[in-house]
Image: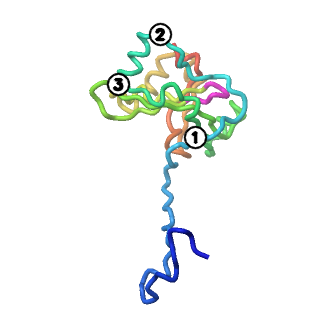
């Protein structure tokens, strides 16, 4: 049986391509594919804040936040499995359930991806340091200068590259 777009009888039998699949296999990279839309898992305790006044909306536009107005549709499940078991011990979790959005600094075309776990309220801080052009060591220095903050901030290494970095409680990230 052939599909509407393909008629096997129309093919040249001497063609070297007959033994190859019509649709090539997708190559998987070590990095996760761009996060696709799917339904959130569990209880959403930390919703996107998109009900803003006009002045804030202008700033959102200036920083080219996308998909503003539909951030809740941009969610992902990011598994995290590491030799460090303290993340599971502290959170009871082996994955992140995240909402995400991207922004760009005015005059800069680099995308910075903001993610937060909508179940437990951990916010990935990496994009905020990167957009200010801080070195990779600056987040650790900042944590060292704020007593108690290091104890409640998770350093995620290994696993999905998108999830690597420091994740701190929403209330701290908001301050």
Q: How is the image coloured?
A: rainbow
The residue positioned 53% from the left and 42% from the top of the image is: 35
Q: Quadrant of residue 73?
A: top right
The residue positioned 51% from the left and 38% from the top of the image is: 164
**Disc 2 from disc 3: Cα separation:** 25 Å
Question: For numbered disc 3, what is the local secondary structure?
Answer: loop
Q: What stretch is highlighted in magenta?
A: 116-121
Nearest-to-viewer mark from 2 and 3: 2
Residue furthest left as drawn: 107
Q: Name the residue under label 3.
A: 132
- Position of residue 139 relative to residue 56, above or below, is below
Of the two numbered discs 2 and 3 on the same chain, state the one appearing first in sequence: 2
Q: Name the residue under label 2.
A: 53
Give whichever of 12, 172 is nearer the camera: 12
Q: Which mark is residue 120?
A: none
Q: Where is residue 57 in the image (x, y as percent from the top left)?
A: 43, 16
Give whichever of 22, 141 is nearer the camera: 22
**Disc 2 from disc 1: Cα separation:** 27 Å
């Amino acid at each position: 049986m052939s599909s509407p777009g393909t008629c096997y009888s129309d093919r040249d039998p001497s063609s070297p391509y007959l033994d190859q699949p019509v649709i090539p296999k997708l190559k998987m990279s070590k990095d996760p594919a761009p996060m696709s839309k799917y339904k959130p898992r569990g209880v959403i305790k930390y919703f996107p804040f998109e009900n803003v006044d006009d002045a804030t909306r202008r700033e959102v536009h200036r920083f080219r936040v996308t998909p503003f107005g539909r951030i809740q549709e941009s969610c992902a499940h990011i598994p995290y499995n590491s030799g460090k078991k303290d993340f599971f011990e502290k959170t009871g979790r082996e994955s992140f359930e995240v909402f995400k959005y991207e922004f760009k600094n005015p005059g800069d075309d680099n995308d910075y991806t903001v993610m937060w776990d909508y179940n437990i309220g951990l916010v990935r801080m990496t994009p905020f340091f990167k957009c200010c052009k801080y070195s990779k060591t600056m987040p650790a220095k900042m944590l060292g200068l704020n007593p108690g903050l290091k104890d409640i901030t998770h350093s995620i290494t290994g696993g999905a590259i998108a999830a690597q970095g420091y994740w701190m409680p929403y209330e701290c990230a908001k301050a």
